[in-house]
């Protein structure tokens, strides 16, 4: 055996695998299972329980059962934080003198650092805590994950991917897998993401309001057509546009009073990225333009409620065109 070869670290008697980064939690659990299978040569030494359905005594009974062969027995308990005081106390007693060859893994949130159970696991085993990146750091995280798929994302492309996939890490990984399968290794462009990645009607509405605020006429009408092509209700599209312009007007008004546009947008309850967009777009509209846009939207509201005998989608497109004319 090569003296430099890394020796396997002995398995601990207990593990607590927790945190908001579900992908890392799942990876840690998978590695633990693979280690037990490799050491024992079978998956028969792995028992799985759910703390929402099984009492601690059932788990302890499994953990006290002799393993097959010479390998360890692994007892996995998901949603471990769901146990009440009596079940947790039973596990505490078990951990005071765990049997040789038994590995107990508690998985999930709900066991706090100041709890006796947390301290007991840390004392005789190991706590593995994985926290997900904050929303602002998801684009950087996506770029790092992309390398594992053999593809490369620039900052703008990663931001677009996160916007489309949302804050769910599994969704981001799924879209990265799709990009890698569809494109192969190499750099991923913005068009690649827009063409291959899933885009919801909600995302398309955001793209529409974003283009409206930026004055991008071509994108505005492309997004309107895409929404109607997916049978989006004109009234729903109208409400999204009206809400966007209401935010623009409030931020522009605050800026006119000398207040910071970005902070004003955050005060409306917007997340950092949309708040930044609103702050930037508010500079594209003078107060008079925003007032006129508000009037156009009020007229559209009346038309959608039956003031004119006109198809709702056509009424919305005409109103959008009038708003775009304000930008020229």
Image (cartoon, rainbow, N blue to C red):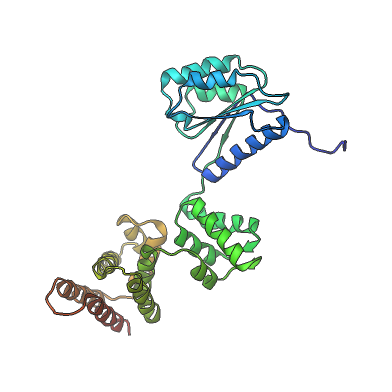
Which of the pair 211/57 is nearer the observer?
Answer: 57
Q: Position of residue 324 (x, y in %)?
A: 31, 81
Which of the pair 293/188 is nearer the observer?
Answer: 188
From this viewpoint, is residue 131 visible?
yes
Q: Quadrant of residue 1?
A: top right
Looking at the image, residue 200 sits to the left or right of residue 175; the answer is: left
Q: Quadrant of residue 104?
A: top right
From this viewpoint, which residue is outermost toward the left?
A: 307
From this viewpoint, is residue 111 visible?
no
Q: Position of residue 232 (x, y in %)?
A: 31, 68
Q: Position of residue 90 (x, y in %)?
A: 49, 16
Q: Is residue 183 above or below residue 20?
A: below
Looking at the image, residue 83 sits to the left or right of residue 61; the answer is: left
Q: Is residue 314 above or below residue 143?
A: below
Residue at the image position 28 percent from the left and 64 percent from the top: 247
Q: Position of residue 87 (x, y in %)?
A: 45, 20
Residue at the image position 61 percent from the left and 68 percent from the top: 183
Residue at the image position 44 percent from the left and 31 percent from the top: 110
Which of the pair 135/102 is nearer the observer?
Answer: 102
In the rendered view of the protein, which quadrant contains the C terminus? Answer: bottom left
């Amino acid at each position: 055996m090569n003296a430099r070869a890394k020796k396997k670290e002995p398995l601990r008697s207990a593990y607590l695998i927790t945190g908001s980064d579900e992908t890392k939690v799942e990876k840690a659990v998978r590695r633990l299972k693979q280690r037990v299978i490799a050491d024992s040569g079978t998956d028969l030494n792995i028992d799985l329980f759910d703390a929402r359905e099984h009492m601690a005594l059932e788990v302890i009974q499994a953990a006290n059962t002799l393993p097959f062969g010479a390998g360890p027995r692994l007892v996995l308990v998901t949603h471990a934080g769901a146990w009440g005081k009596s079940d947790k106390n039973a596990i505490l007693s078990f951990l005071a003198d765990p049997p040789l060859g038994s590995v107990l893994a508690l998985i999930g949130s709900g066991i706090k650092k100041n709890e006796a159970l947390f301290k007991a696991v840390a004392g005789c085993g190991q706590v593995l805590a994985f926290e997900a990146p904050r929303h602002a750091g998801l684009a950087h995280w996506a770029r790092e994950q992309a390398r594992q798929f053999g593809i490369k994302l620039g900052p703008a492309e990663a931001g677009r991917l996160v916007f489309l996939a949302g804050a769910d890490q599994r969704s981001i990984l799924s879209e990265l897998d799709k990009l890698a399968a569809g494109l192969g290794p190499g750099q991923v462009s913005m068009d690649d993401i827009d063409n291959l990645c899933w885009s919801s009607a909600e995302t398309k509405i955001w793209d529409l309001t974003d283009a409206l605020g930026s004055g991008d006429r071509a994108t505005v009408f492309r997004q309107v057509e895409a929404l109607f092509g997916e049978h989006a209700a004109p009234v729903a599209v109208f409400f999204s546009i009206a809400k966007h312009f209401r935010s623009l007007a409030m931020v522009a008004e605050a800026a006119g009073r000398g207040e910071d546009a970005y902070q004003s947008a955050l005060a409306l309850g917007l997340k950092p990225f949309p708040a930044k967009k609103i702050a930037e777009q508010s500079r594209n509209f003078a107060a008079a333009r925003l007032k006129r846009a508000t009037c156009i939207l009020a007229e559209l509201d009346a038309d959608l409620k039956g003031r004119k005998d006109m198809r709702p989608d056509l009424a919305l497109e005409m109103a959008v065109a009038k708003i775009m004319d304000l930008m020229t």
